[in-house]
Image: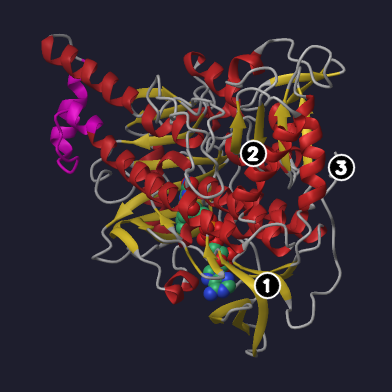
């Protein structure tokens, strides 16, 4: 697959600037920011503190929204080639150990037949499991191919901004030399201990560090315990497993079925335990439930479980993205996905401002649109830890530290009689409730942006007809993600999402929408914008043989939907106005408003 970028520009920065955008950090947020900006034809430099990209797997659930960004950038195939496919993500298993009593399973990540169609209908992309060790090299190597300059072993030390740009002080960690980098804008994607966010004095809410967790990555062939019940996560109810940590003890698949991450809680007030070989082996044996396996440990690290989000995410010419502004546990798998979406939201705005196609006020919409998402996902992930408590409640265990009581209550699960039946029912309900962690499709798709970069058309936001956390509800209401529908070109199936994006605005219309086609040509010439028109309907360049688009578009055949480069709806009109001139006036005015011109 080849990619046709809007514009590739490797010319040196204009005098006075080393680059247009300096990105600090090469994680999912920074990597995608560099890739997007380079693809959009913006000069971008990325500095990153270490000599390498992620050396541990960390975030792994890669949801459809992230995959859509990869698809828009023309690199979805690289992700699919390396990731563990959707079908192997099919369960979340609760048990006492891999060889112990199984308590139940949650069909996960949209693989439940009762949920699968929801996922297939929402996106042309699949869910995949792709640890950061897979995602980061793809993002960063593609960013470099498209012109981004990357400096490893380079530490951000501080910055000063003025009316025209930002001067960042960086240290070359190989030589110790400190030097300045002058850019128009800076993006702080420097993770949960973000110095950029601290230097900006961003306000945070939430209790902060709430628990501690240990991650131990190891190779061990455990296929005989797991291959018959493929899961990304195996959660273990064991004495002490609910103390601190992510809810219970976890064995997380990294590569099926011979690479694993073990997660176990620790009390941050006491500090992490000593990771001796013996300690690590004992923990692994406890969770596997037998010592009849060989293992080779590749990393061991303590980390903090946070409940912390920034309520303002930018100041002037400096923006923060990713864990720099939302710090939360891995539950729901929202870490790198949200970080990538932050960048998807901001990159086109920076590109349009830098190219002189938008006013600086467009950049204000980043905070308006993404700060509420930071709050939402931090609350969601922390709630998922609390929800795990329902499983212990179902067993009548306020904590799991009393081994005798744990054994006794687990025996009730297998016993005949009223107590057993009641406990089994409560357990089934508690485990099924975990769908809010493992099938929270709405959390991933239902953001509705309200900002200057969205033009309301006076219609109220459609109310959610199903649980908005669990179910994605597509709409073309301005501020929502453009709905996906399979349409055809010359009979070949293509997603509506494929017809937009790629750094440009797109007008979707249909039969009778010629006024919009003419309006788009005029607006494009007047504003110097890359503005595409897609007409869908019988006899149009794109056809809608299944009628899905007609069901989803919420406008008439001759209406128009204006999609932003990040595939969010900026504006919509239900029917064509009386004249082509009126359509031109409406579309140009909408674009001027959205772009702050
Ligand atoms: C052990 C562990 C396990 C995790 N597991 C999961 C999981 O299973 N699922 C999940 O969704 N999330 C998980 N997370 C969280 C997930 O890793 C983050 O949400 C995600 O990495 C955020 O991406 P980011 O780009 O914002 O930050 P990061 O990935 O943290 O990247 C920050 C980048 O900034 C660089 N940097 C930092 N300081 C400086 C500086 N001063 N100068 C220059 N560069 C700097 C770093 O080198 C790095 O490149 C885990 C995190 C940890 C620590």
Q: Residue at the spot x=67%, y=11% of the render?
A: 547
Q: Residue at the spot x=23%, y=31% of the render?
A: 390
- Residue 151 seen in the figure: yes
**Mark before the other along the chain sequence, 1 or 3:** 3
Q: Nearer the viewer, residue 166 or 258?
A: 166
Residue 265: x and y, percent? 32, 52
Labels 2 and 1 touching (C-beta < 8 A): no
Callout 3: CB less than 8 Å from ligand 1: no
Q: Nearer the viewer, residue 199 or 114?
A: 199
Main secondary structure along the magenta-highlighted residues: helix
Q: Which residue is mark 2?
A: 567
Q: Residue at the spot x=16%, y=26% of the render?
A: 409
Q: Residue at the spot x=53%, y=25% of the render?
A: 474
Q: CA distance from mark 1 to mark 3?
A: 28 Å
Q: Is disc 3 placed on a helix, strand or loop?
A: loop
**Mark before the other along the chain sequence, 2 or 3:** 3
**Which residues are the magenta region?**
390-414
Residue 338: x and y, percent? 51, 47
Q: CA distance from mark 2 to mark 3?
A: 21 Å
Q: Which residue is mark 1?
A: 152
Residue 257, relative to residue 182: is it above or below? above
Q: Is disc 2 placed on a helix, strand or loop?
A: loop
């Amino acid at each position: 697959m080849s990619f046709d970028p809007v514009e590739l520009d490797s010319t040196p920065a204009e005098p006075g600037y080393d680059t247009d955008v300096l990105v600090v950090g090469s994680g999912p947020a920074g990597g995608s920011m560099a890739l997007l900006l380079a693809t959009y034809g913006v000069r971008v430099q990325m500095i990153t503190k270490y000599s390498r990209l992620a050396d541990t797997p960390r975030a792994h659930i890669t949801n459809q929204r992230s995959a859509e960004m990869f698809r828009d950038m023309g690199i979805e195939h690289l992700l699919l080639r390396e990731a563990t496919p959707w079908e192997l993500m099919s369960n979340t298993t609760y048990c006492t150990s891999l060889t112990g009593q199984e308590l139940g399973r949650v069909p996960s990540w949209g693989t439940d037949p009762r949920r699968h169609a929801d996922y297939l209908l929402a996106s042309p992309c699949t869910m995949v499991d792709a640890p950061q060790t897979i995602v980061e090299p793809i993002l960063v190597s593609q960013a470099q191919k498209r012109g981004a300059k990357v400096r490893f072993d380079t530490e951000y030390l501080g910055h000063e901004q003025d009316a025209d740009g930002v001067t960042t002080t960086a240290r070359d960690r190989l030589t110790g030399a400190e030097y300045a980098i002058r850019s128009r804008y800076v993006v702080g994607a420097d993770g949960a201990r973000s110095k950029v966010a601290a230097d900006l004095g961003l306000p945070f809410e939430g209790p902060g560090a709430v628990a501690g967790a240990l991650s131990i990555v190891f190779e061990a062939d455990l296929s005989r315990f797991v291959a018959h019940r493929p899961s990304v996560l195996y959660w273990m109810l064991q004495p002490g497993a609910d103390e601190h940590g992510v809810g219970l003890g976890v064995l997380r698949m990294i590569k099926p079925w011979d690479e694993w991450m073990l997660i176990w809680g620790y009390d941050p007030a006491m500090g992490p335990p000593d990771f001796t070989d013996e300690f690590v082996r004992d923990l692994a044996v406890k969770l596997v439930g037998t010592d009849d396996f060989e293992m080779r440990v590749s990393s061991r690290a303590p980390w903090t479980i946070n409940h912390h989000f920034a309520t303002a995410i930018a100041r002037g010419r400096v923006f923060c993205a990713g864990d720099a502004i939302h710090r939360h546990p891995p539950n729901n798998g929202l870490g790198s996905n949200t970080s990538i979406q932050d960048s998807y939201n901001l990159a086109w705005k920076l590109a349009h401002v830098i190219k002189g196609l938008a006013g600086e006020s467009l950049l204000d919409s980043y905070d308006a649109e993404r700060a509420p998402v930071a709050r939402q996902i931090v609350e969601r992930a922390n709630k998922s830890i609390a929800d795990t408590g329902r499983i212990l409640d179902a067993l009548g265990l306020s904590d799991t530290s009393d081994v005798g009581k744990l054994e006794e209550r687990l025996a009730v699960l297998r016993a005949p009689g009223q107590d057993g039946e009641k406990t089994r029912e409560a357990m089934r309900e508690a485990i099924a409730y975990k769908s809010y962690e493992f099938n929270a499709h709405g959390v991933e798709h239902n953001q509705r942006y309200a900002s200057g970069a969205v033009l309301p058309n006076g219609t109220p936001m459609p109310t959610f007809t199903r649980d908005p956390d669990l179910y994605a509800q597509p709409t073309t209401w301005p501020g929502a993600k453009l709905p996906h529908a399979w349409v055809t070109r010359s009979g070949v199936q293509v997603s509506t999402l494929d017809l937009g994006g790629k750094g440009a605005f797109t007008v979707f219309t249909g039969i009778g929408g010629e006024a919009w086609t003419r309006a788009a040509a005029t607006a494009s010439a007047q504003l110097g914008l890359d503005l595409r028109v897609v007409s869908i309907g019988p006899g149009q360049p794109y056809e809608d043989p299944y009628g899905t688009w007609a069901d989803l578009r919420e406008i008439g055949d001759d209406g128009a939907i204006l999609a932003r480069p990040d595939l969010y709806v900026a504006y919509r009109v239900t029917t064509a106005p009386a004249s082509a001139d009126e359509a031109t006036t409406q579309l140009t005015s909408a674009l001027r408003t959205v772009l702050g011109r």
